[in-house]
């Protein structure tokens, strides 16, 4: 049974990175699905929907990266 | 960076050291013509390569993405301030200089009001930011903020693109060639500076439009029950700070993550070479292909991040100028 704090940090970093990606992927996936459906129903609004989608994707991505940095710091420090 | 990896590949020899080191180095040198001559000296005497510091992958990764002082420069200490030219500082100044030069060239390319060459490309972006970002999100007085938004856009774009471009260097002391490249927006201090400017712009927009007191009073939505005020005031104050904070973290993390992924993919080569020479050679095309893919993705990310930073800044300025909409 490893009780080395460094091992625990690596373990936490691995789990945390996986959870982060699950969250980010779920968010971006839902966003993309909704945007595609919107564009398919209303091709004229494609440009506007794409712009709004990129902004929302950027917001989700920002939070995802924030927690990824926390996990990287766990693994490296 | 590639040079650094090759050095690492040379320094992590599998058990039959004399045999494997040159074997692993030659295909790598063939795959990377730019770095090939750089390692002419270590290949001559493989013992010399062994003398250098043994870096483990995490160290190489951190060395690549963190700020390093420039070699051979002196530093100035003013009280608690430690002023020293560093890699990110150099690329920060270079990116600013490139932006200024590109814009000057663009202005000079106008002949009787018609742009040519680089001017046409810059004009497209400028018009897009003025019409689609500033005026749509800030409103009629959006034109006032166009210069600021354009500065953000072009600086972030050029800084990110410069991080993807390898700059050859030559060390006069050791007589070795190297490659230096850095994204200055991959440094938290640089993005903090950008975010502070954005924060001032947001507050300026509200204060100049409504006056100092009315700007802060207007942040609380009208018609709110009195007993909610103790909750809403801290929340609104938090919102003032959290918007630029999100801008800062997003840009920093995006720039950092791309470089980390590319470095990690290239680090697969020495990691596999440490297992066996065959694995090391076999992983080279895979690693280079994946790194190239991420590099191309980074080109896209450079544009998207510049766009998002500009867009969000203009949205926040608009929210500050027109509260409770």
Image (cartoon, grey):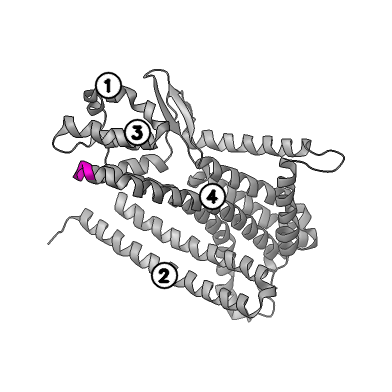
Residue named by callout 4 = B299
- Dot 1 falls on which chain? B
Residue named by callout 2 = A23
Nearest to the observer: residue B166 or residue A63: B166
Mark 3 vs mark 1: tell me if same chain.
yes
Residue named by callout 1 = B44
Q: Among all residues in the image, which is located at the extreme left?
A: A1
User: Distance between the Cα atoms at labels 3 and 1?
Assistant: 14 Å
Nearest to the observer: residue B220 or residue B1: B1
Res B103 → quadrant = top right
Residue B29 tag number: 3
Q: Is residue A60 magenta?
A: no
Q: Are marks 2 and 3 in contact (CB under 8 Å)?
A: no
Q: Secondary structure at mark 2?
A: helix
Horizontally, residue B26 falls left or right of residue A23, namely: left
Nearest to the observer: residue B144 or residue B35: B35
First to last magenta residue range: B274-278
Image depth: mark 3 or mark 4 in front = 3
- Dot 4 falls on which chain? B
């Amino acid at each position: 049974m490893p009780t080395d704090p460094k091992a625990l940090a690596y373990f936490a970093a691995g789990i945390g990175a996986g959870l982060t990606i699950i969250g980010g992927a779920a968010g971006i996936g839902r966003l993309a699905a909704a945007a595609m459906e919107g564009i398919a129903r209303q091709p004229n609004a494609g440009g506007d929907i794409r712009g709004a989608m990129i902004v929302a994707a950027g917001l989700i991505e920002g939070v995802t990266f924030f927690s990824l940095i926390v996990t990287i710091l766990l693994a490296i420090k | 960076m590639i040079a650094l990896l090759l050095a690492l590949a040379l320094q992590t020899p599998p058990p039959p050291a004399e045999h494997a080191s040159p074997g692993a180095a030659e295909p790598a040198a063939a795959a990377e013509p730019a770095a090939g001559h750089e390692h002419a000296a270590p290949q001559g005497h493989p013992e010399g390569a062994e003398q250098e510091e043994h870096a483990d992958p995490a160290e190489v990764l951190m060395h690549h993405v963190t700020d390093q002082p420039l070699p051979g420069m002196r530093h100035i200490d003013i009280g608690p301030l430690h002023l020293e030219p560093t890699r990110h500082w150099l690329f920060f100044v270079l990116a600013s200089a490139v932006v200024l030069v590109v814009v000057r060239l663009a202005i000079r390319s106008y002949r009787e009001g018609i742009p040519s060459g680089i001017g046409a490309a810059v004009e497209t972006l400028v018009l897009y930011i003025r019409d689609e970002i500033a005026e749509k999100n800030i409103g009629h007085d959006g034109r006032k903020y166009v210069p600021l938004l354009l500065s953000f856009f072009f600086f972030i774009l050029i800084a990110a693109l410069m991080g993807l471009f390898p700059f050859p260097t030559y060390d006069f002391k050791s007589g070795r060639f190297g490659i230096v490249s850095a994204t200055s927006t991959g440094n938290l201090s640089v993005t903090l500076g950008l975010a502070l400017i954005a924060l001032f712009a947001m507050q300026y927009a509200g204060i100049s439009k409504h006056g100092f007191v009315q700007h802060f009073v207007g942040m609380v939505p009208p018609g709110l029950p009195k007993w909610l005020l103790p909750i809403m005031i801290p929340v609104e104050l938090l919102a003032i700070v959290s918007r630029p904070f999100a801008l800062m973290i997003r840009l920093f993390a995006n720039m950092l993550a791309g470089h980390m992924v590319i470095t990690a993919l290239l680090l697969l080569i020495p990691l596999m070479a440490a297992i066996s020479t065959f694995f090391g050679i076999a992983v080279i095309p895979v690693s280079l292909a994946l790194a190239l893919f991420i590099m191309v993705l980074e080109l896209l990310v450079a544009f998207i991040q510049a766009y998002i930073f500009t867009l969000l800044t203009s949205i926040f300025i608009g929210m500050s100028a027109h509260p409770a909409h």
